[in-house]
């Protein structure tokens, strides 16, 4: 039981590391949760602090998912698809509701992409490209993120249920659990963004937010 629960707990604790929030405190001495969308993700970092920091935060949030899931397979001899899937979901939950920061985190896009790239690199890359294309056309990061998430969820579920042969794929049916629940968590975390998109009040890509230093 410990061997089953411990990787999931550790995944949640690692997911709870909010690099965007830490970057805001260290680089700009601000709590980015008080500005913009209130998210600790790289998009809000981009609007508040700038491109270089946002790029670093994005890479760190993606990497924490990839590195942990890879290490899990390496360090846990009896690792199973169920443990990996539940650990992936726990890491995503930690990012969205981090225990270290009063359960106020990001939207889950970056670690979600990292998890998808680990489970199935091809679908992960295609989901990322889908998101980028929608962002470029619409200028809405949130819309691109949602569409990329839906693309990944639909296609990962498809190959998981049908056993469709795709290169660099495990084709485990349990992966559909992550596809469905993970996408649901990410889209739920975007509910305010969806409301702003419908009201046409959502911030577009490139818009900056003024902040006060030394808050």
Image (cartoon, rainbow, N blue to C red):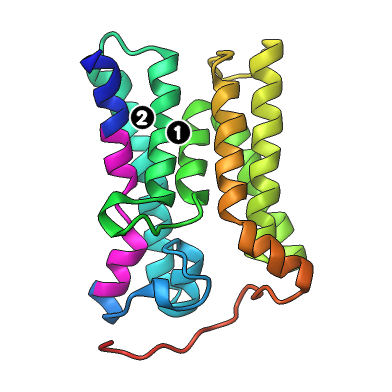
Q: Residue at x 30, y 89 (%)?
A: 213
Mark sitting on residue 69: 2
Question: From what the image shows, is residue 206 above or below residue 3?
Answer: below
Q: Is residue 130 visible?
A: no
Mark sitting on residue 155: none
Residue 17 on the magenta span: yes
**Residue 56 locus on image (x, y percent):** 37, 61
Which range is magenta? 10-25
- Asked where in the image residue 160 lies, by quadrant, the reply is top right
Question: From what the image shows, is residue 14 above or below residue 209?
Answer: above
**Residue 77 locus on image (x, y percent):** 26, 10
Q: Choose mark 1 or mark 2, whichever is in front.
A: 1
Mark nearer the N terminus (1 vs 2): 2
Tag 1's secondary structure? helix
- Of residues 193 and 209, the one drawn nearer to the viewer in this rendering: 193
Tag 2's secondary structure? helix
Q: Residue at x 45, y 61 (%)?
A: 41
Q: Which residue bears the numbered disc 1?
A: 89
**Residue 138 locus on image (x, y percent):** 76, 66
């Amino acid at each position: 039981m410990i061997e089953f629960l411990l990787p999931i707990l550790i995944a949640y604790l690692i997911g709870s590391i909010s690099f965007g929030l830490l970057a805001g405190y260290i680089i700009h001495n601000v709590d980015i949760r008080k500005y913009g969308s209130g998210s600790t993700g790289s998009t809000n970092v981009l609007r508040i602090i700038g491109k270089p920091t946002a790029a670093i935060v994005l890479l760190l949030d993606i990497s924490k998912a990839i590195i942990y899931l890879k290490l899990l397979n390496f360090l846990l001899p009896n690792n199973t698809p169920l443990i990996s899937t539940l650990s992936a979901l726990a890491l995503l939950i930690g990012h969205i509701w981090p225990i270290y920061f009063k359960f106020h985190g990001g939207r889950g896009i970056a670690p979600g992409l990292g998890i998808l790239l680990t489970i199935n690199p091809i679908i992960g890359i295609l989901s990322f490209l889908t998101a980028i294309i929608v962002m470029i056309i619409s200028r809405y990061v949130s819309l691109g993120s949602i569409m990329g998430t839906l693309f990944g969820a639909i296609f990962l579920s498809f190959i998981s249920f049908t056993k469709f042969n795709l290169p660099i794929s495990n084709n485990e049916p349990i992966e559909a659990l992550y596809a469905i629940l993970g996408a649901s968590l990410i889209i739920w975390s975007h509910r305010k963004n969806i409301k702003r998109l419908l009201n046409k009040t959502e911030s577009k890509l490139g818009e900056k937010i003024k902040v006060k230093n030394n808050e």
